Image: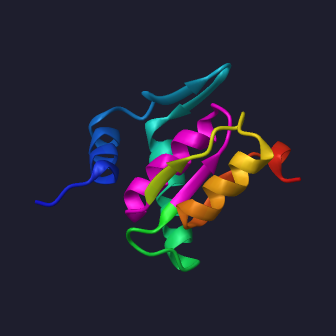
Amino acid sequence: MDWNFGDMLDAVGAALGPSDIAVAHGDRRIVWPEFTARSNRLARALLGLGAKTGDKAGFYLRNQAEYMEGLAACFKARLAHVNVNYRYLDDELVYIFDNSDATVVFFDADFAP
C-alpha cells in the first residue's frame, strides 16, 4: 500500500477513541474525529479549488490549531508544505512567496495587510 502522512493521520484517528485529543493549544482541545473531519473537508476544498498533487502551500501562521489542521489537509491532498515564519520582514516575505511557487497560502488574519 502507498501511504502518505495524511493516510497515517486518518489511521491514527480511526484507532483512537472519540474523546482522544488530537490537538491541544491553550484551553482549546480538538478531538480526533473533529480533527479528521475538518482536515478532510479542507483537503477536499483545496483540491476542489484547483490545487493539484505536488503543489506548494505556504503557511504564514503563528502556532495554533489551524496550523496543524492545514498541515494535515495538505498531507491528505498531497501538497507540499512551505513554512513562512511570521517574523520575516517585508523583503523576506516577498522573496519566499515569490520563489516558493505556492499556489495556496494559509495566513493568520493579523497578517492580511
The x and y percentages for residue 106 are 65, 54
> Looking at the image, can residue 42 be seen?
no
Quadrant of residue 15 within the rendered picture:
top left
Quadrant of residue 18 within the rendered picture:
top left
Question: Left or right: 43 with respect to 98?
Answer: left
At horizontal 72% and vertical 56% (from top left) the residue drawn is 94
Identify whether 90 is placed above or below 62.
Answer: below
> Looking at the image, can residue 10 be seen?
yes
Asked whether 45 or 36 is in front, the reply is 45
Question: Left or right: 47 with respect to 59?
Answer: left
At horizontal 75% and vertical 45% (from top left) the residue drawn is 108
Identify whether 40 is placed above or below 65.
Answer: below
Specify the quadrant that holds the N terminus.
Answer: bottom left
Question: Left or right: 97 with respect to 23?
Answer: right
The x and y percentages for residue 40 are 46, 58
At horizontal 52% and vertical 40% (from top left) the residue drawn is 68
Q: How many marks?
A: 0
In the image as oriented, which residue stretches furthest toward the right? 113
In the image as oriented, which residue stretches furthest toward the left? 1
Asked whether 89 or 6 is in front, the reply is 89
The x and y percentages for residue 21 are 47, 27
Question: Left or right: 11 with respect to 25?
Answer: left
Residue 35 inside the magenta-drawn segment: no
The x and y percentages for residue 8 are 27, 46
Question: How are the residues colored?
Answer: rainbow
Residue 66 inside the magenta-drawn segment: yes
At horizontal 43% and vertical 62% (from top left) the residue drawn is 79
Question: What range is drawn magenta here?
Answer: 57-79
